[in-house]
Image (spheres, rainbow, N blue to C red):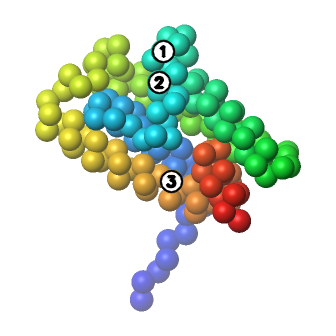
Amino acid sequence: MARKIKVSSEFTYLAAIILLSLAVAIISAADFGISMIVAPAYLLSLKMGVLSFGQAEYVVQACVFIILCVVLKKFKFSYLFSFGTCLIYGFVLDLWRKIPFFNPSITSPGSMDLWLRVVMFAFGMILTSFAVALFFKTYLFPQVYDFFVKSVNI
């Protein structure tokens, strides 16, 4: 008889943040393109120069958060928890990008062998999917992007 493994929602939430930020760091280092969801923050961080990738996520997700409130025609204090998730995610993303392998100022994107970049991109895409699925398996608020989809679909 197979026994189900119970994992706390808090652990799932933290795993989702850590894995999603790692996936984004891997995909951006592979330099084959990134998800259109994180692309605005990535471009903002490249063009502004003063904002890190994680900090640019704060700006972009704040704008998405405002749009969410306008679309829903309401604001609940609890919605701010999704932005709190964004703050943690952005911080962890910046931590991953301090590792020389993912740091574009040390290892320029696209400078690795093609086979390694292909593996990184494929692994990053799979990891992204898994991490987003984890966010939906917890009672805690996902990032603003995912919370937007979840709220508008209801």
Viewer-proximal residue among 108 and 44: 44
- The crowd level at tag 1 (other Cα within 10 Å; few <14, some 14-19, many 20+) is few
- The Cα atoms of the two marked residues, 1 and 2, are separated by 6 Å
> In the rendering, at what x and y percent does residue 56 appear?
57, 24
Of the residues shown, which amino acid type is indicated by label 3?
Answer: Val
Q: Residues within 10 Å of mark 3 (few under 14, many from 20)?
A: some
Residue 132 bears which disc, if any? 3
Mark 1: amino acid: Lys
Q: Secondary structure at mark 2?
A: helix
Residue 150 appearing in the image: yes
Question: Could you tell me residue 137's position as x and y percent?
Answer: 58, 63
Residue at figure coordinates x 42%, y 25% from the top left: 97
Residue named by callout 2? 43
Q: Is disc 3 placed on a helix, strand or loop?
A: helix
Q: Position of residue 79 (x, y in %)?
A: 77, 47
Label at residue 47 = 1
Q: Earlier in the sequence, mark 3 or mark 2?
A: 2
- State the separation of the CA atoms marked 3 and 1: 27 Å
Which residue is at the front of the view, 102 or 69?
A: 69
What residue is drawn where x is 29% and y is 47%?
123
Residue 61 placement: quadrant: top right
Residue 60, compared with residue 81, is above or below; it is above
Q: CA distance from mark 3 to mark 2?
A: 22 Å
